[in-house]
Image (cartoon, grey):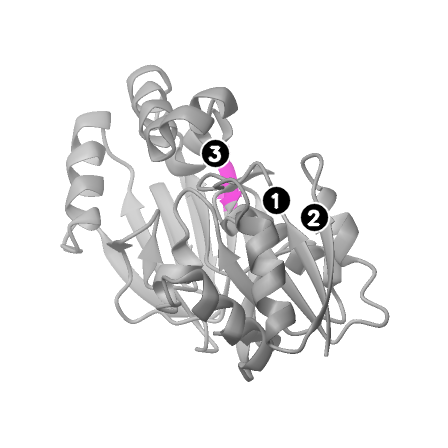
């Protein structure tokens, strides 16, 4: 089996030698492994665009690197396996990947692909979540130098700055069945249960389901929004927050958009579920 191993050496939890050791573990499993190191933002997607001659792609990095690889492969994805090395590693937690590197590498070589649903927001795909509102503004404002030092702390610091300084912007969403929700402060389209790490935001969501679970929060003041977000992260989704099930929606408004924890521009986009599209080895 020939594997294309795309690794991000700048990923959050990178430890000296982990990429080299992972490649060696996979070779011991009988795989022919070719290593490609990313050098700049977007490089993983460029590397993933050429999969000729490879049976699988193995991605060492965080959720953002995985997102780049998925988008780079489309519209003809190869089976993808993951060596989690990021800050939050939501996909690894969601799928309960092994914690030991050797076990992760054995799974990458010998595991069987399972078809996962992807979300598509405009021309871009996501695997875990899409967020419109203050979470996206916080992602966009993350200081990358601080992220290298503090990890998740950089996201919390950016979120605090956004909460403190920026006005809450109104968002509207229209579900696939025609139901319209006006005057929202936050929309999170969940293709997975977890958000930002171990926080269970949408218990019924699954990357293997053909539909999303969508968390919406009505427009409110910044203090009320803070309390509501804190309750959501504790798994307490109750009024004024709601969770809806849909296969697609249209988001509009003046807010920002994030996909799998990466900034993605304006929050004015059509989002749809694409079931059974990605062969994922988990």
Circle 2 SS class: helix
Q: What stretch is highlighted in magenta?
A: 252-258
* Relative horizontal placement of residue 163, taking residue 17 as reference (left or right): left
* Relative horizontal placement of residue 71, taking residue 61 as reference (left or right): right
Q: Are marks 3 and 1 in contact (CB under 8 Å)?
A: no
The numbered mark at residue 8 is 1
Look at the image and tell me in which quarter the N terminus lies.
Answer: bottom right
Nearer the N terminus, badge 3 or badge 1? Answer: 1
The numbered mark at residue 123 is none
Comparing labels 3 and 2, the label whose residue is closer to the camera: 2
* Relative horizontal placement of residue 99, taking residue 281 as reference (left or right): left
Circle 1 SS class: loop
Q: Are marks 2 and 1 in contact (CB under 8 Å)?
A: yes
Query: Is the residue marked by circle 3 packed among few (<14), some (14-19), or many (20+) residues within 10 Å?
Result: many
Residue under numbered circle 3: 255
Residue closer to the observer: 187 or 37: 37
Comparing labels 3 and 1, the label whose residue is closer to the camera: 1
Indicate whether 218 appears above or below 57. Answer: above
Nearer the N terminus, badge 2 or badge 1? Answer: 1
Query: Is the residue marked by circle 2 packed among few (<14), some (14-19), or many (20+) residues within 10 Å?
Result: many
Q: Which residue is drawn at 50% across and 75% down?
A: 107
Circle 3 SS class: loop
Quarter of the figure with residue 118: bottom right
Quarter of the figure with residue 159: top left
Query: Is the residue marked by circle 1 packed among few (<14), some (14-19), or many (20+) residues within 10 Å?
Result: many
């Amino acid at each position: 089996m020939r594997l294309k191993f795309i690794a991000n050496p700048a990923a959050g939890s990178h430890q000296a030698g982990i990429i080299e050791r992972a490649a060696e573990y996979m070779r011991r499993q009988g795989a022919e492994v070719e290593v490609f190191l990313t050098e700049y933002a977007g490089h993983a997607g460029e590397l993933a665009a050429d999969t000729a001659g490879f049976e699988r792609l193995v991605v060492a990095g965080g959720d953002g690197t995985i997102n780049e690889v998925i988008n780079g492969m489309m519209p003809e994805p190869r089976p993808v396996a993951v060596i989690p090395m990021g800050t939050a590693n939501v996909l690894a937690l969601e799928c309960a990947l092994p914690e030991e590197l050797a076990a992760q590498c054995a799974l990458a070589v010998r595991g069987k692909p399972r078809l996962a649903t992807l979300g598509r927001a405009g021309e871009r795909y996501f695997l875990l979540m899409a967020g419109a509102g203050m979470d996206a503004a916080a992602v966009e404002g993350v200081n990358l130098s601080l992220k290298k030092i503090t990890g998740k702390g950089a996201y919390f610091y950016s979120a605090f700055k956004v909460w403190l300084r920026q006005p809450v912007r109104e968002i509207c969403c229209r579900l696939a069945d025609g139901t319209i929700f006006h005057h929202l402060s936050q929309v999170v389209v969940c293709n997975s249960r977890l958000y930002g790490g171990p926080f269970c935001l949408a218990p019924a969501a699954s990357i293997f389901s053909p539909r999303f679970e969508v968390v919406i929060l009505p427009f409110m003041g910044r203090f009320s929004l803070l309390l509501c977000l804190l309750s959501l992260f504790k798994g307490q989704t109750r009024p004024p927050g709601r969770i809806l099930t849909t296969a697609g929606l249209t988001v509009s408004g003046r807010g920002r958009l994030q996909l799998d924890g990466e900034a993605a521009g304006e929050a004015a986009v059509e989002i749809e579920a694409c079931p059974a599209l990605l062969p994922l080895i988990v």
